[in-house]
Image (cartoon, rainbow, N blue to C red):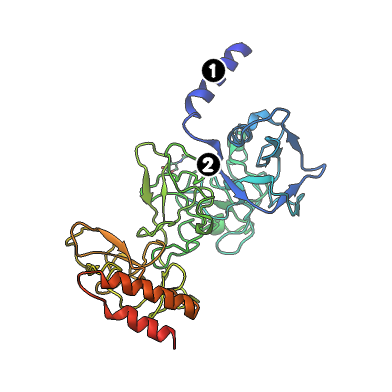
Amino acid sequence: MWMYNLLIGLFIISCCESRRNALQDYQTTNGIGLTGTPAAPFRLSRRKMSVAKCAKTCSRAKRFPFICRAFVYDHRNRKCQWLSFDRNSHAVVLSQDDSNYQLYQKKDYVRECIVGTGVNYRGERSVTVGGIRCQTWASPLPHEHKFMSKKYRKNDLRDNLCRNPDNSTVGPWCFTTDPRPHLRYQDCGIPQCSQVECVSCNGEDYRGPMDHTQSGKECQRWDLQEPHKHLHHPKSFQDKGLDDNLCRNPDGRHMPWCYTTDPHTPWEYCHIKVCDTARESNVVETTVCSQGRGENYRGTVDMTPTGLTCQRWDAQYPHTHTFTPQDYGCKDLRENYCRNPDGQESPWCFTTDPRVRTMSCTNIPQCGVQNSQAAEGEMELRLELDGSPSGAPGDWRENALQLHG
Ligand SMILES: *[C@@H]1O[C@H](CO)[C@@H](O)[C@H](O)[C@H]1NC(C)=O
């Protein structure tokens, strides 16, 4: 009989878990480690295994005498340490960690927001939205209820923590410690992940916790190549916040997006709260020169270094495109001026030549370049521009002059 059960078990595991990488359920944290105590058990792997295998083992709770909430992966030795605790547990000591070790914690336990009804919420909140302390689930006082039954064991009805064992649409809730009948239960007001941080402009700065697309699909982790192979590896885009499987905008699309775990949908935008007021920004806009990649260049150069006139951003001729002034409200896509709305190396534009779709406006001088270098740049530009059919545009000259004071 046990053999039969084992075979059924193996079948279920191989058939249904193969598609989805168990790592999807974890939040990666750098720079902190968790230390166990006798009250908080952990278990070490004997064999070497991949990080995905560690995650899979942790998620298959039956392997342990405890519920696995997190694991530490040792990248050098390819071993893992499964933990019965996470950073919210009382028994835990936080410590600075070695870069060879990475901590993965189950999102359901450490994240204080929900997606959908929050039926898997395993967080630590124990107060209702009205500020009333929750009743302990195992107790019939002050309110009697059905959730003491064994049937609800898998819902993690620990202590008096907010949970959603009946998948109520209000989200995680609890019975309250207020005996008055009309306050029998109350929801806990745990926010939707799409609401805890807002998006301004096109959301390149968004670093919030949303991890589902606008049609409700789960996002694919940026550090995985399944189900979709892609080039947005976190190591190649270090300043873009490509954490776990969170919605981000590393490449100047209209808003944060992600690859999806649906093999038939490569990527989709995410629906996230929009900020009421544009966030205060300390970036300095420049008009006579381009700082860094020139994302804040607001000058009026409207010609490429080869003398081609730029196409107006609000026009779809000769080139059709998605960089419309409406969709990029913070990018100042005025007239046909060179701009960098999508994090390219420098400001650019679509050109009015049907054969040349886009070109970098490297004729805009770099800010803060030393005089001699700027002079050299000017020489090169002059040569290039002299050779072009339409002659030199006025702007670069003006810019150069202003730059030199
Ligand atoms: C919870 O309810 C939602 C609809 O409100 C449904 O889509 C979802 O499948 C339910 N989840 C579970 C685990 O019952």
Q: Nearer the viewer, mark 2 or mark 1?
A: 2
Residue name at image x 47 percent, y 50 percent: 211
**Residue on which disc 2 sits:** 24
Is residue 332 at least partly visible in the picture?
A: no
Is residue 106 at least partly visible in the picture?
A: yes
In the rendered image, the vertical position of residue 61 relative to residue 347, given as above or below: above
Residue name at image x 68 percent, y 30 percent: 48
Q: Amino acid at mark 2?
A: Gln
Q: Residue 65 at x, y = what percent?
A: 72, 32
In the rendered image, the vertical position of residue 102 relative to residue 48, given as above or below: below
Q: Is mark 1 within 8 Å of ligand 1?
A: no
Q: Is residue 88 left or right of residue 395?
A: right
| Closer to us: 122 or 169 | 122
Quarter that holds the C terminus: bottom left
Query: Quarter containing ligand 1?
Result: top left
Q: Residue 238 at x, y = what percent?
A: 54, 55
Local SS, label 1:
helix
Local SS, label 2:
helix
Residue name at image x 43 percent, y 43 percent: 230
Check whether the beta carbons of the residues at disc 2 and disc 1 lie within 8 A of each other.
no
Q: Rounded to the nearest whole Å, what is the CA distance between mark 2 and mark 1? A: 25 Å
Query: Quarter of the image holding residue 158?
Result: top right
Residue name at image x 50 percent, y 78 percent: 370
Q: Residue 357 at x, y = what percent?
A: 25, 58
Query: Quarter of the image holding residue 178?
Result: bottom right
